[in-house]
Image: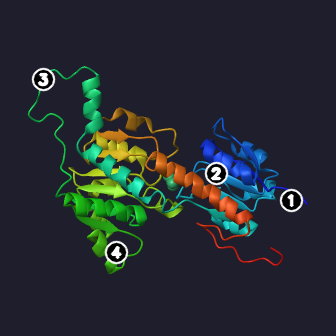
Amino acid sequence: MSMKKPKIGIARGVFPEVLAKLEAHFDVVSNQSDSVLTKAQIIAMLKDCDGAFTTGGDRIDAEVFVACPRLKIVANMAVGYNNFDIPAFNAAHVQATNTPDVLTETTADFGFALMMATARRITESEHFLRAGKWNKWGFDMFAGSDIHGATLGILGMGRIGQGIARRGSHGFGMKVIYHNRSKLDSATEESCRASYVTKEKLLKTADHLVLVLPYSPENHHTIGAAELAQMKPTATLVNIARGGIVDDAALALALKNKTISAAGIDVFEGEPSVHPDLLTVPNVVLTPHIASSSVPTRMAMANLAADNLIDFFAGREVRTPINNLPQRAGT
Ligand code: GLV
């Protein structure tokens, strides 16, 4: 008896090895051209699919589930899942999965790199050099701020925040303070050498503030004009969390007015568009949402998303569920 393979849709391009692995298990519709699909195109692709492989830019909500009634699982190749409407997943009884853990250390490396590039004005000085403006050494040329010995503030102390804290305290002798929805247990605080403070104290005390909290409507513009005004004028701000956590217009103004000294931003409100004012201020390092992008880690993320689909249709527990669906009779 030949069993019909489940059908899955892959919303964006993916590593050929991962595509081949999925093709061994599924009837696959893929988008190897890697064009960004509109909602209508996603629906057209997933209309008769049993499962989907998505990335953080693909919005999946009730509209998709109504139009694609066969969908039973959507595997996101990202740890953040603000592109998923989880109550709609639960209502439609669709499994959601993400890719935690495999990207923690790589993303923490990048957060640290962006903080260092920001504090030491790496890209700003490179632009100066490439523009042919370097004709003499100067005693305060691109003088930035120190990392070693400085106070590192972390807003959002999950796995990635803890990785950045460890790098700062163990590797660079930084004093680490953090604010989080809940205080960590003392063993975790001890391993990170980090102390819990109020958000206000964090803003006022940090020499370098790194944002690593998940996006939710409640923390939209968690860092806006009022918060930036509380920071030290010598401080730097790094956002590797999500666009929308920072008010980008307010940030551009704060950078222009030197309310803070510099920023490093990997994620933007409305990306891939970038607020035009951010493009005109020199004291900001801008990167195109690449914090998890090392070759091994992007491969691990793609494989984890694929394995969640494979395990699900083989009747096994998915590896990294976002929602826990109640068992339904007959399934
Ligand atoms: C990237 O932004 C992710 O959430 O994995």
Residue sitting nearer the eye, 244 or 112: 112
User: Residue at 45% across / 39% down in the picture?
Assistant: 275
Q: Please, what is the three-letter code of the amino acid marked with disc 1?
A: Met
Q: Is residue 159 above or below residue 133?
A: below
Q: Nearer the viewer, mark 4 or mark 3?
A: 4
Q: Cβ–Cβ below 8 Å for labels 1 and 2?
A: no
Reading the chain from its start, which is encountered first: label 3 or label 2? 2
Residue 124 position within the rendered picture, expressed as x and y whole percent measured from the top left: 28, 34
Q: Quadrant of the C terminus?
A: bottom right
Report which residue position mark 4 lands on: 188
Q: Within the image, what quadrant is residue 277 found in?
A: top left
User: Residue at 53% across / 44% down in the picture?
Assistant: 270
Q: Please, what is the three-letter code of the amino acid marked with disc 4?
A: Thr
For marks 4 and 2, give the CA distance.
Answer: 33 Å
Residue 85 appears anywhere in the view: no
Report which residue position mark 2 lands on: 54
Q: Cβ–Cβ below 8 Å for labels 3 and 1?
A: no
For marks 3 and 1, give the CA distance.
Answer: 73 Å
Report which residue position mark 3 lands on: 136
Report which residue position mark 1 lands on: 3
Q: Nearer the viewer, mark 4 or mark 1?
A: 1
Reading the chain from its start, which is encountered first: label 4 or label 3? 3
Label 1 sits on a secondary structure element that is: loop
Residue 98 position within the rendered picture, expressed as x and y whole percent measured from the top left: 58, 60
Residue sitting nearer the eye, 70 or 318: 318
For marks 4 and 1, give the CA distance.
Answer: 48 Å
Reading the chain from its start, which is encountered first: label 4 or label 2? 2
Q: Please, what is the three-letter code of the amino acid marked with disc 2?
A: Thr
